[in-house]
Amino acid sequence: MLTKIGEVIESNTTEFTVECYELYTMPPLGSLVRTADAPVEIYGIVCQAGTASIEPGRRPIARGKDETSEAAVYQSNPQLTKLLRSEFRVLVAGHRSDGKIYQYLPSVPAHIHSFIHLCSSKEVKEFSQSFDFLSILTSTRLPISIEDVIAATLREMSRTQTDPHAFLIAGGKSLTSILGSDYQRLKTILMRLRQ
Amino acid sequence: MEPQTNKILGIVTAGSVEKGVEVRLDSAASVEDMVVGRYVTIDGKKRRFFGMVTDISLGVTDQEIAIAPPDAADTFTAEVLEGTATYGALHVLPMLTIGGDADSVTEGPQPVKTVPSHFSKVKLASEQDMDLVFGKEDNSRFYIGNPLDMETKLCLNLEELVKRSNGIFGKSGTGKTFLTRLLLIGMLQKSKATNLIFDMHNEYGWAGSSEGGQRTVKALKPLFQSKVAVFTLDEENSRHRGVSTDFVVKIGYDEIEPEDIALLRQTLNLTEPAVEAVYQLRRRFGKDWIQKALEMSDSDETKDLLQQLNIHESTFQNLKRGLGTIRRLPFIVSHAPMNAVEGLLQYLERGVNVVLEFGRYRDTTTYMLVANMLARRIYNHYQQRMEASMAGNVTPPAPLVITIEEAHKFLNREIAGYTIFGTIAREMRKYNVTLLVVDQRPSAIDEEVMSQLGTKITCLLDNERDIDAVLAGVSGKNDLKTVLARLASKQQALIFGHAVPMPVAFRPRDWGTEESYKEFTHGGDAMKQAEKDIKDLFE
Ligand SMILES: Nc1ncnc2c1ncn2[C@@H]1O[C@H](COP(=O)(O)OP(=O)(O)OP(=O)(O)O)[C@@H](O)[C@H]1O
Ligand SMILES: [Mg+2]
């Protein structure tokens, strides 16, 4: 049984925001997560994450002047874990319906309060049999560099593969045909892929 | 490593019937595995095409890649780009349709009249496809060599081949003689034709030289004793070389006709009037005209005679000098003890192939005089027999193939109209006689003769005019030029014309090792079977 790591608190067709149940438990950039909204489960890629005060108006203040470590700060102020929350943003990368994975947008967005799971290696492997989702990612505009997100995604996925290098090459090739004439962009991503 | 045949090499992206098609190489296929001259099949929607790779190129989807290529150390990027943003492209010339349409099913491979549609898959030609196109060794097909870089055998239907005159070309030392010997063996085994070989350099009878004379290789006689007779013009030389001969050719003055002299006009340095005088002397003196003319002394009688014949004194002197050259040829006698033509015919009619060695007499005068004289008489004989057979009373003679080296001597523009060889070449096979011309300077051969050659096999040529002469009138000439120019300097050739459904660059079979001899004589088994069949037929 998969454990849920958080739930959707904001959602539209192309992306959703997830609040983590525990502070600082957001998955790494580029991770594959999914909702458990039967009949359609929505897959997405973690594209941005952050931690901030629960109340927008109240900013945290520095508290560690007399402490020896960060951990000690939280120990001395147990209320902090309740005043702060970790969130992450997910780009929709596909969905599964009737047991089949489709790497294009689902017809309806995720519900608010949908539970979010981090996909297992097996599921990542299954999802990454196709690179069609890359074309959804490449056409997205984000406040952060999408090239970084794409590179992180492929790197994350490559860990589940028997031949990570071959996987990265294949992913790179798909990107090449998607980006076509945009050689500069391609180069930016490839630079972040090579080990 | 030999790429697999069933693997898809790429897909067709553009093209035209005339220029051929562009094939985008699949990213899994490496350009470096491709070779120009390789055969491929293209699975069109309605028919299958058979073609040849004529060019291989590298392409980029974005010019920027060529301008700012990845770092040489960045193998990752290079690997990603390979086959996607950078790709290999093949230029393929579709040549045949093999299967798919009705004609090619019933009649075998057909010349192409269209191009495969967009994105048709291209594969290396399979063994079966190759057999379909290049033939399988059988009773009439002779294995002559292998298409370049391939195991497949190229097999020619020699029964078909000998129906027309053919040519073997290539610059000096490229393997013409070796190739000719191969074809002769083929004919000897797989066709009903008999061969007469004018062997100017003594390479076809007992032994030929190899590797620039450092080694000798067997020729036809030691391999096919009973099927080959060696005639010689130079008995002493044959004895000196320790080879036995079946017939010593002597030529009597009385056998030389004015036409024979007319041909030698240039080599003998005769003037135009001197040639005319020859005809007059022949009319006046009959068969013994040469003897008589040479005997004419500086007397008043002679002057009167010349005046009567309207031959100028200086013309006569010019002619006499020319005839003197002929008289000095050692095999010329006033009267030959045995008629060489009859001797030849006796062997040829029994189906024995004849090699006529010239011994030391390799000068142009001898070669042209003898080859032309003998060939003309033999041709006349075949002509009579064919006409008789058409009248319905006798069987036609078995086809005769006459091999001439240095063919341009007989077939150049000036004299092709007069020599018997010119006649044979132009008449095709009207009288069951065809030529196998072997030459290193095809541009010197009369265009009309060249155009009549059914099948041409050419080794490397480097003179532009020779290349043009050989490829004149062939479709896809430019592509073939590239192929021709890339042939190795030895033992590689391009064949095109009647005997093959499409041009093929190939490596002629090896000649000169014990195994090779064994393979050639072993091929005779089929022959023996054929002989047995014939025998059975009559019993
Ligand atoms: N099929 C072959 N097998 C083995 N060796 C070959 C073959 N073809 C050519 N060679 C090599 O190439 C050399 C030249 O071949 P060949 O004598 O047939 O040339 P050529 O074209 O007839 O030359 P030339 O114009 O001088 O008569 C041979 O001596 C031999 O070493
Ligand atoms: Mg030769």
Image (cartoon, rainbow, N blue to C red):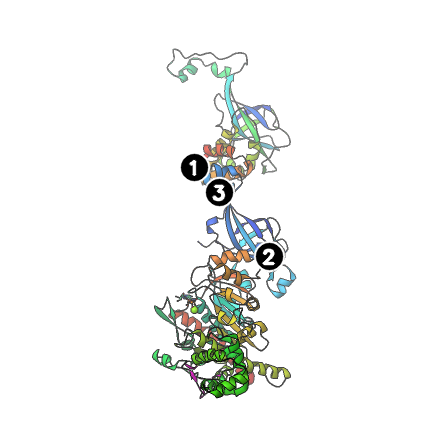
Where residue B448 appears, x then y in whole percent? 57, 67
Mark 2 or mark 3: whose residue is earlier in sequence:
2
* Highlighted magenta segment, given as a residue range: B327-341
Specify few, some or many for label 1: CA neighbours under 10 Å numbering under 14, 14-19, or 20 or more.
few
Secondary structure found at label 2: strand
Where residue A161 appears, x then y in whole percent? 47, 39
Tell me the CA gap for discs 1 and 3. Answer: 14 Å
Q: Are labels 2 and 3 assigned to the same chain?
A: yes
Tell me the CA gap for discs 2 and 1. Answer: 42 Å
Apparent side of residue B357 relative to residue A183 in the rendered image (left or right): left
Foreground label between 2 and 1 = 1
Q: Chain of mark 2?
A: B
The image shows residue B246, relative to residue B509, as above or below, that is below
Q: Quadrant of ligand 2?
A: bottom left
Secondary structure found at label 3: loop
Specify few, some or many for label 2: CA neighbours under 10 Å numbering under 14, 14-19, or 20 or more.
many
Specify few, some or many for label 3: CA neighbours under 10 Å numbering under 14, 14-19, or 20 or more.
many
Disc 2 marks which amino acid?
Arg
Prevalent SS, magenta region: loop
The total number of labels drawn is 3
